Amino acid sequence: MSAEPRQPNQAFSLERTGAVLIKEFIQLTRDRITYALILAVPVIQMLLFGYAINTDPRHLPTAILVQENSVFARSVVSGIANSSYFDINHQVRNAAELDELVRTGQVQFAITIPGDFTRRVVRGDRAQILVEADATDPTATGSALAALAQLPREALRRDLTGAVAPPADPEQPFEIVVHRRYNPENITAYNIVPGLLGIVLTLTLVMMTAIGVTREQERGTMESLLATPVQPLEVMIGKLAPFVIVGMIQTALILIIGRVLFGVPMAGGWPGLILGTTLFIIGSLGLGFLISTLTRTQLQAMQLSVFYLLPSILLSGFMFPFRGMPDWAQWLGTLIPVTHFLRIVRGALLKGQGFADMGPSLLALAVFVCAVAALALARYRTTLD
Amino acid sequence: MTVAIDAQGLNKSFGGRRVVKDFSIRVDEGRITGFLGPNGSGKTTTLRMLCGLLTPDSGTGTALGFDIISESWEIKRRTGYMTQKFSLYEDLTVEENLQFSARIRSLDRIGERVADALEQLGLAERRKQLAGTLSGGWKQRLALAVATLHEPQLLLLDEPTAGVDPQARRTFWDEIHTLAARGLTVLVSTHYMDEAERCHDIAYIAYGELLARGTAEEVIAGAKLATWRGEGPGVDRLAGELLRDPAVEMAAPFGLALHVSGGDADRLERALAPYQRSPFRWARTEPTLEDVFIHLMSRVPDNFQ
Ligand SMILES: Nc1ncnc2c1ncn2[C@@H]1O[C@H](COP(=O)(O)OP(=O)(O)OP(=O)(O)O)[C@@H](O)[C@H]1O
Ligand SMILES: [Mg+2]
């Protein structure tokens, strides 16, 4: 008779969890490419997006429509041209042409100086110039529009000190009316970094775990694993724990790059940020595990992960301003964990929010974690059926 | 004698096709039972049901006294299961695979056990090699070492020696017999006749049905098969001709000789009469296990779709 093995615990054993964890960790370090991607993805994405968000872009293509031939109009045009933000590369003759240029994206700005400009300036009768900004990428227009605010005070200074009578308000001889097209809500550049954090974590963590479990099924190692006394919760914790560390490293990388290279403000809110990030990482891993219980092959797991990733990018407020979306999309977006994670990260970094302000979002993430963990465990099969 | 495996009326279907049909089996403790049958006959499926990896559609059973459906955890703790397809981690080393198995089964003295196993396997110097880079036969041997590391009471082996060289197979079987002498029960599927003969007894399954059970002698005797052995130049080429007679169930060349078998000895003798001439020499002989298996297989309706 062979020796009876030590009586192990049936319900939950740290030893067995540890066995899975160590195995996963070794496999992770052995897979050099994955290892490299874990570090490279956040860094490369940050650099790509980070320099794309270049907070102070200049020399933006501009079209101008001048409807009167006057000294004032010429002064305004040269005032605009002198600012390094605008490159006037189209002088158009009518509004339709102007519109076409903006619509096709050939120019970022379309400036109109109306026919009654001089008359109104002289009379002090609310003279206006109209600036249409293509705010599809609001980060591109922000600084330029800010610079434009100086124009009324500066542009006509010399002309107005001459023979003509001074306008009603010498500080503000005319006003600038700005229309932001395509993206009325003006996201700041700093929104990108927190957003990217959410997307990178989703991308790597959901996919890696989703694939990690289906890989065992595909390679047949699941059969051996299931023939051991290991329990579902132990497999889950053991498989996911190494990736919690991966997620933490990625978070640190992104925040450091954001701070050092892009000067993202860090207003505080660290406790909430840490709690939120931890919940989000665990939830994403749990979701990956859940996906793996729904799929048979690594390819299917990939596809399902992408299926989840797309709305996370599009509806979470990362790509489009959340409040700019139609009601149904906002409603859908609220169901997506990344949305709440973005609110937490933005709230913490940009506004220094405390726990109380983040309450609803933290709660949403907690619900997310519990739901995916429960579903994954319920779906996990201890047999091959 | 205690019963290690006792299963009654197991059924299993995949996608509407019944691959195991009313399968019942008893295996006594300390016995080595060979599990034989053609490809796709349900051997792997049955082994999986016995260790809780598949749930039978109907039927009941116990392994080591535990219910195979409700107490599979207890069975898994005490059982070593070696899968037909290599299912260790190819990206872990030989040693890491053994360590993982030891940890997941909460063993004590892990370092010692792993070192012993490596020594016994003869893989001590290659313990840092990735399991995926081992040759086919070495993979099988490693898998067996992993399956026996926790000193199981029941060993379910699914074609453990496929692709293993003769010397290693002999070592393997010696090892199995040593373990069985200490009380280990073994159910081992195989396609090799010499291995079937090394088992204490045999279970023969075809198309999901258990067709024969007992020791090799009992199985041979139970088949009630008459066999003639023919010799002489060109005798091996008579097979096709002979098989046209319904009394001849099987005619198979064995090297230069021909084995001709049938269930009815008299009719078989009459069928052979025209060939009782020079240069052929015929002699009644004991059927081999292989004769019996081919005979058994030819009797079941071919329902393999
Ligand atoms: N998971 C599954 N899904 C569908 N069909 C299956 C599954 N597993 C086995 N089968 C079918 O069940 C039948 C029996 O398969 P099984 O693997 O048990 O045969 P076997 O006796 O082990 O064959 P072999 O000697 O080739 O290993 C086969 O026809 C196979 O196609
Ligand atoms: Mg098989």
Image: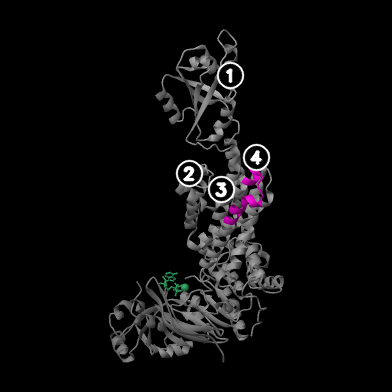
Residue A147's quadrant in the figure?
top right
Residue under numbered circle 3: A199
Q: Amino acid at mark 1?
A: Asp
Mark yes or no: residue A197 visible: yes
Label 1 marks a residue whose chain is: A
Q: Are marks 2 and 4 in contact (CB under 8 Å)?
A: no
Label 2 – label 3 distance at C-alpha: 19 Å
**Is label 3 or label 1 in front?**
1
| Nearest to N terminus: mark 2 or mark 4 | 4
Residue under numbered circle 4: A264
Label 2 within 8 A of ligand 1 by Cβ? no
Question: Mark 1 falls on what kind of element?
Answer: loop
Q: In the image, residue B165 lies at what x, y percent?
A: 55, 71
* Residue drawn at x 56%, y 38% as measured from the top left: A187
Label 3 – label 4 distance at C-alpha: 17 Å
| Nearest to N terminus: mark 4 or mark 1 | 1
Q: Which residues are magenta?
A: A347-364
Q: In the image, residue A197 lies at what x, y percent?
A: 60, 47
Whether marks 3 and 1 lie on the same chain: yes
